[in-house]
Every structure is written in structure tokens, then in C-alpha cells.
Amino acid sequence: MTINELKEICINDSIPILRDKTLEYIINIIKENKIKSILEIGTAYGYSSFAFNQIDCVNEILSIEKNKDNYLKAKNFLAGNKKINLVNDDCFDFVPNKKYDLIFIDGPKSHQDQLFLKYSNYLEDNGFIIIDNIFLKKYSSIDFNSLTKNQQHLVKKVKEFQKWLENNNEWNINILDIDDGVAICHKK
């Protein structure tokens, strides 16, 4: 299977994937910093893991997916990729047994703050945490009062996390307005 074939399957099944500019930007960070190990929160069908696996410097990818059906599909799509280890578990329960050069958070958007705080403990010195969908632009063109209570809660949580990142003094944080927004976090 090729990356484009997997992308097409994800699109047809309405599985969210990294957008092209965001993926390109992350790949450049991985290459420039010679990232060897990646921990991914949120596998879905394994599209980003598949892309990261193709980068020469990457030796290991651990990807966590809670949804059993998505996990099984990813396992099938990524079969034979020896650098990728998939785990079917809840990211709030899972405990890594090592530290990683890059942690990619693409899990539950309303809990990005909790995921950041938990998984930053598993980041190597000089490593990066990258968070996708930092803007949730799909809700920005809709009147806030016409959103459901759950959508309003999600928008509030994501905006609060964005402000927390912007005001954080322990990390160098660059929030980029590409695609749906991506935060690049590097410990000071």
C-alpha cells in the first residue's frame, strides 16, 4: 500500500488525517532535528505513522489508539512496517516505558492540556511536542451560540489551551496558522 492509497481510504471513510501542509511541516522538523523516536497519541488508520515511517532517521514509532476498529484497520494497513508499534489503549491510561524525541498529540481535542502535561514527562531533553488542530477552524465560521453545548465546550477548552500555551514560560511554543493550526513545543 502507498501513502496515497491510505489517504484515499481515510478520506472515503471520513477518517481525519493530517493535512498536507501540516504533514510537510512536521516531516521537515523530523528531518532537520534527526528525530529517531516518535510517540503518537491518536492513530486512527495510521496515516501519519505511515508517513513518519518513511523518514530515514526515524527508527521507532509507538502509536496509541483507543478505538478498537480503527486500531485493527491501522494494524492491517501498517502490517510489515517494523518500525511501527501500535497499541490499543486509552491514552489517559497508557504509560510509556521510555522517553521519545517527538510526541505528536492528535488525540481528544478537549483534553489537549491533560495530554500535554502527562506526556511531556516522556519527552527526551531537547525533544518536541507537536499538537495538531490547535484552532478547530471548522467552528470558527459558525456563530458560537448556534453550536451545541458539547461543541461550545470543545471550542472553549481548545481556546483556553491555546492561551495557556501562549503564556507558558517553560516552553518555546510556536503556534502556526497552517491548515487547522499546529503548535510546535520545545522545552527551554
Image (cartoon, rainbow, N blue to C red):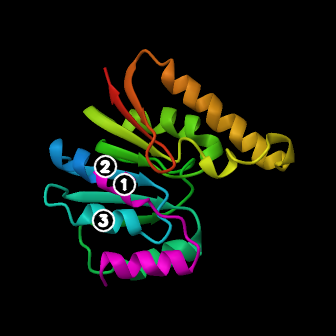
Left or right for 19, reference 28: right
Q: CA distance from mark 3 to mark 2?
A: 12 Å
What is the residue that sits farthest to the front in this orientation? 141
Q: Residue at x 63, y 37 (%)?
A: 158
Question: How would you rate the neighbour count of disc 2 (Cα within 10 Å): few for under 14, some for 14-19, many for 20 or more?
Answer: few
Left or right for 150, reference 163: right
The residue pinned by badge 2 equals 25
Quarter occupied by the C terminus:
top left
Q: Amino acid at mark 2?
A: Tyr
- The kind of secondary structure element at disc 2 is helix
Q: If you read the primary sequence from the N terminus, does the residue marked by circle 1 or circle 3 appear first?
A: 1
Q: Residue at x 60, y 47 (%)?
A: 137
Residue 3 among those drawn in magenta: yes
Give above or below for 142 relative to 60.
above
Q: Residue at x 44, y 64 (%)?
A: 87
The residue pinned by badge 1 equals 21
Q: Evaluate if marks 1 and 2 touch, with contact meaning CB atoms under 8 Å apart.
A: yes
Residue 117 among those drawn in magenta: no
Q: Residue at x 31, y 84 (%)?
A: 1
Span of residues in magenta: 1-26
From the image, state whether disc 3 or disc 2 is nearer to you.
Answer: 2
Number of on-image labels: 3
Give above or below for 1 relative to 174.
below
Between residue 92 and residue 34, name the one nearer to us. 34
Q: CA distance from mark 1 to mark 2?
A: 6 Å
Give above or below for 122 relative to 8.
above
The percent position of residue 164, horizontal first and vertical second, equals 56, 24
The residue pinned by badge 3 equals 51
The kind of secondary structure the magenta stretch mainly shows is helix
